[in-house]
Image: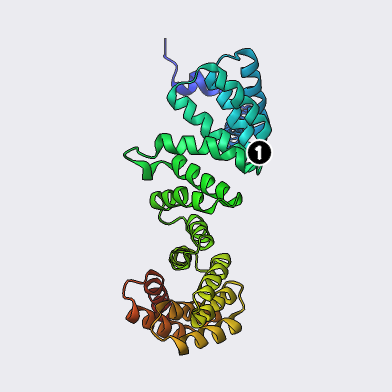
């Protein structure tokens, strides 16, 4: 018997135009389904990733966990964290008081002190904040890597500021000095330390702190105002003009700033800070050649002046482009 060829066996499938059309249609449907499936998957993967839980949900879960296991220190402190993140300071203090009854370890006790002090500080109950913050700082201040301990720096800052708010200026100096030692670029701590020095009559030390603070924040209005007060008490009118000129600069009153800074320059030509201030002001006005000249004069007077060096480099790059 003659064997059937391939076309003999399968030719029936293609024996009519209608059958061919059906095959084409089915193939198209399959392709559409595949494309649609891929598109749906891509869209889901791109836009419908599981969302992070909201703060309210996390707080509710933490409250439930404490109700189910009230003896757990970790669960209670998680709830404390949730309350603090939600600025519910009274609730955090209530939980911290409960945590105190769980026989905390030394490290756990330190956490209680810190969170208690911060919560009282945020409630502006500064007298209540002092003791727990001081206990935390005293417990950690002698550790080898104190400068890397962010909690320690924060506790020292809150302690110092609490004492300032209570007008205990001499007491505030030690924790603020610690904070500045551990975080040398913290302009706010530098300013507050300067304020404490000024309140006990050490205006030159106060000015040194204000200068450091404004090195990192050139438009720190409060620091310049305090600086002007200290220079005034030291009977240094040319430096009062400098300070007030920088107040005007920080408030974007550039014409007034130039007038005061040039008046200060005329009376005291060897102070690099005045030329840095002129550089900032001219730069803000778009007078880049004048700004560069002022920065270069500041560098001539003080080759290590960070603000002047950066300012000169910034203007030179701008003028090259």
Relative vertical location of residue 96 with respect to residue 125 in this rendering, above or below: above
Q: Residue 239's x, y, as percent?
A: 49, 79
Closer-to-camera residue (33/99)? 99
Q: Residue at x 61, y 21 (%)?
A: 98
In the rendered image, which quarter contains the N terminus? top left
Q: Can you see residue 217? A: yes
Q: Residue at x 39, y 71 (%)?
A: 310
Relative vertical location of residue 147 with respect to residue 143 in this rendering, above or below: below
Q: Residue 195's x, y, as percent?
A: 53, 60
Q: Residue 291's x, y, as percent?
A: 46, 82
Q: Residue at x 41, y 71 (%)?
A: 307
Q: Residue 39's x, y, as percent?
A: 59, 36
Closer-to-camera residue (60/214)? 214
Which residue is disc 1 drawn over? 87
Closer-to-camera residue (317/226)? 226
Relative vertical location of residue 125 with respect to residue 271 in this rendering, above or below: above
Q: Residue at x 51, y 21 (%)?
A: 10
Q: Describe residue 79's horizontal placement relative to residue 137 as left or right.
A: right
In the rendered image, which quarter contains the C terminus? bottom left
């Amino acid at each position: 018997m003659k064997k059937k060829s391939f076309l003999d066996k399968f030719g029936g499938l293609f024996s009519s135009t209608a059958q061919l059309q059906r095959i084409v249609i089915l193939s198209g449907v399959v392709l559409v389904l595949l494309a649609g499936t891929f598109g749906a998957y891509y869209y889901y993967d791109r836009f419908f990733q599981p969302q992070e839980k909201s703060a309210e949900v996390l707080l509710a879960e933490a409250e439930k966990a404490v109700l189910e296991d009230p003896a757990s220190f970790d669960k209670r402190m998680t709830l404390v964290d949730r309350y603090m993140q939600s600025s519910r300071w009274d609730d955090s203090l209530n939980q911290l008081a409960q945590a105190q009854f769980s026989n905390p370890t030394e490290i756990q006790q330190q956490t209680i002190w810190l969170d208690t002090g911060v919560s009282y500080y945020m409630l502006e109950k500064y007298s209540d904040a002092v003791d727990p913050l001081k206990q935390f700082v005293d417990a950690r201040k002698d550790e080898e890597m104190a400068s890397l301990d962010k909690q320690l720096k924060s506790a020292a800052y809150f302690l110092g500021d609490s004492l300032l708010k209570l007008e205990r200026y001499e007491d505030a100096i030690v924790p603020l000095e610690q904070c500045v030692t551990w975080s040398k670029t913290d302009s706010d701590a530098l300013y507050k330390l300067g304020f404490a020095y000024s309140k006990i009559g050490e205006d030159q030390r106060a000015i040194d702190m204000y200068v450091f603070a404004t090195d990192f924040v050139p438009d720190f209005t409060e620091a310049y105002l305090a600086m002007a007060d200290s220079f005034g008490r030291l009977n240094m009118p040319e430096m009062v003009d400098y300070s007030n000129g920088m107040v005007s600069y920080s408030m974007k009153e550039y014409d007034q700033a130039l007038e005061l800074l040039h008046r200060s320059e005329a009376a005291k030509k060897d102070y690099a800070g005045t030329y840095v201030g002129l550089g900032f002001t001219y730069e803000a006005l778009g007078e880049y050649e004048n700004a560069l000249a002022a920065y270069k004069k500041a560098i001539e007077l003080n080759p290590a002046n960070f603000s002047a060096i950066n300012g000169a480099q910034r203007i030179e790059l701008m003028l090259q482009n």
